[in-house]
Amino acid sequence: MPPARPVEALDGCRRSGRIGRDLAVTWLCFHVGVRRVTDAPLGTQLFVLQTVIVLLAVGGTAGVWAGHTREQLDALHQQRALAIAQSVAALPQVRDAFRLENPESVLQPLALSVQHETGADYVAIANAQQKRYAHPNAALIGKRLSTDGTAVLRTGRSWVGTETGTIGTTVRGKTPIRDEYGNIIGLVSVGVLQTTVTGQLGGALPPLIWTALAVLLAGLALAALITARVRRQTFGLEPREIAALLEQREGVLHGVKEGVLALDLAGRVTLVNDAARDLLGDLGTDVSSMPVSERMRDVLTGDDPGEDRVVLHGDRVLVLNRTPVSVRGRHRGWVVTLRDRTELVRLARELDDTSSATEALRAQAHEFANRMHTVVGLLELGEHEAAIGFITRTAGGTYATGLRERVQDPTLAALLLAKSAEAAERGARLVLSEDSAVPEGALGDPQDAVLVVGNLVANAIDALDGAGGTIEVSVVADARGLHVRVGDSGPGITPELVEEVFREGFTTKAAHSGPRGLGLALTRQACLRRGGWVRVRDAGGTGRDTGGAAREAGGAVFTALLPAEVRA
């Protein structure tokens, strides 16, 4: 059964007689007030809460101070009353008056004089039977004390406290009167009305009230400042709105396929989504300590600015964009997006290789058609011997035939044939060395071999830059793996760039669309992944001679070892 609403519950309680009407109205007003506060905006709730705290603190402090001051005033007047009483009890004329037949004739004027001189509200003197000899109200002389003084008369000890007598509630002190032999013959009671004490307390209240008001105003001002600051920091959003934004952000952040990385001004990682963790692995908390390449670190820190920066991370090709984040015109950090383009780059390279092979086959088909036309022409002219000789020379002298004999792996052979055609189109000549030997099936999965050989040959073609020249390629497969050597007759490479050329992003090519500076980096990565290596040196430098036309013309020489795959 659902709970009753406040008004319904209130009506039920009233009808059952459990609460009265006034109490019911009070409870309802309180409940409605609380609901209004809890439903109010966050800033209002904070202000009300802080105001209540300040009021409680100021009110509590003022109350404690007032209570303590009242206690001190009571104690002060009690001791003062006792001192007056003791002074009166010690007077010789008081002791002597007790021997007279009418002691009140002496004691009443004396008591009134002391009362007037000290400012006490009453001075009363009584005998051992508590019969009054002096009192502010003369009509009460001869009657018994209105408050009991037995304890003082019996014990002989003074007493202080608050009692209510004939003139009202007073703070008073009582002390015994002794004769010359020390016998108790009566008592003196001196008191100050509580209204007098309260009046003195009221005189001390204005400074307290002004101080409390000042503290209250300061507290309210501080509460208003804190509330305004909270509103600014939360951009005026309510908790439910902040929670909704957080849920939406988490949903978007972890729902996108791209990696998202947020960095603060100090280069610390403040936010990372699931896709970024999948791409980068364990990131740590700081860019400087991330297990990434120097190029990727340069992109993350902004040392390598620009859009769509292509970097390598492990076996992945990533595209990074670094965007500054500003809030209210103030720079707060950066957001880095990461896109995985590994498969796209692989497919693009395969497409390039396929296109090159297609062009090579088209060129060969065109060349074959020309030769067939020549043979047909010779036969039509009756030059049968010439036709037979032409066919014999053509059948035994093609580049494809020689290449296929040395490189029996069809994938690698097709790649070299395509690269030969590409080199020819750009005015260069690709030569396969005599020592090349790749038996069929020696490569297993030829993907890495195609990557290494293709990138090294493509780099050599680019090095010639359409100026003509020779590229010499040597590929030898043995028990260790595939040995690759590619030399060109280009301008060569300076010693300081020997290691730099393998860094991702390094390129000497003219800027154009598409990722640059990845080919040699991918080549090195493929070799190192299998435990091999790749090196470069200038053909004119020291080291093992490459032989052939490339050696004679100088240029760069790349050598690589791609170890054979370990088969389970």
Image (cartoon, rainbow, N blue to C red):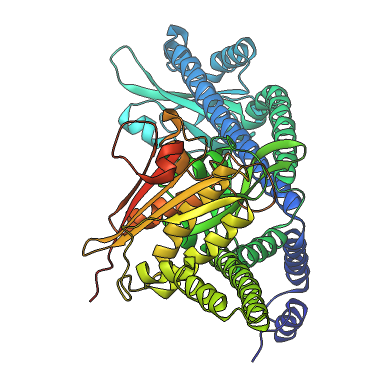
Image check: 486 left or right of 236? left
Question: Which residue in the rendered view is the most extreme toward the top?
Answer: 92
The image shows residue 525 at horizontal and vertical percentages of 40, 53
Q: Quadrant of residue 128?
A: top left
Q: Is residue 557 above or below residue 10?
A: above
Can residue 144 be seen in this snapshot?
no
Instruction: Please identify the quarter of the rendering in which residue 38 is found.
Output: bottom right
Residue 74 point in image, percent of width and height:
54, 28
**Which sits in the foreground, 49 or 118?**
49
- Count of residue discs: 0
Image quarter in which the N terminus is found: bottom right
Residue at 74% in and 42% down: 232
Q: Residue furthest bottom?
A: 1
Instruction: Tell which of 414 and 150 is nearer to you.
Output: 414
- Which corner quadrant holds the C terminus? bottom left
Name the residue nearer the viewer: 400 or 439: 400
Residue 121, percent from left and from top = 63, 23
**Measured from the top left, where is residue 496 in percent x and y?**
43, 28
Q: Is residue 96 above or below residue 497?
A: above
Relative depth, front residue between 45 and 493: 493
Q: Residue at x 50, y 42 (%)?
A: 295
User: What residue is drawn where x is 32% and y is 67%?
Assistant: 438
Q: Is residue 540 left or right of residue 35?
A: left
Which residue is located at x 27 percent, y 55 percent? 531
Relative horizontal placement of residue 369, taking residue 44 as reference (left or right): left
Rendered position, 153 above or below 274 = above
Q: Visible in this render: residue 2?
A: yes
Q: Does residue 461 lie above or below 96 as drawn?
A: below
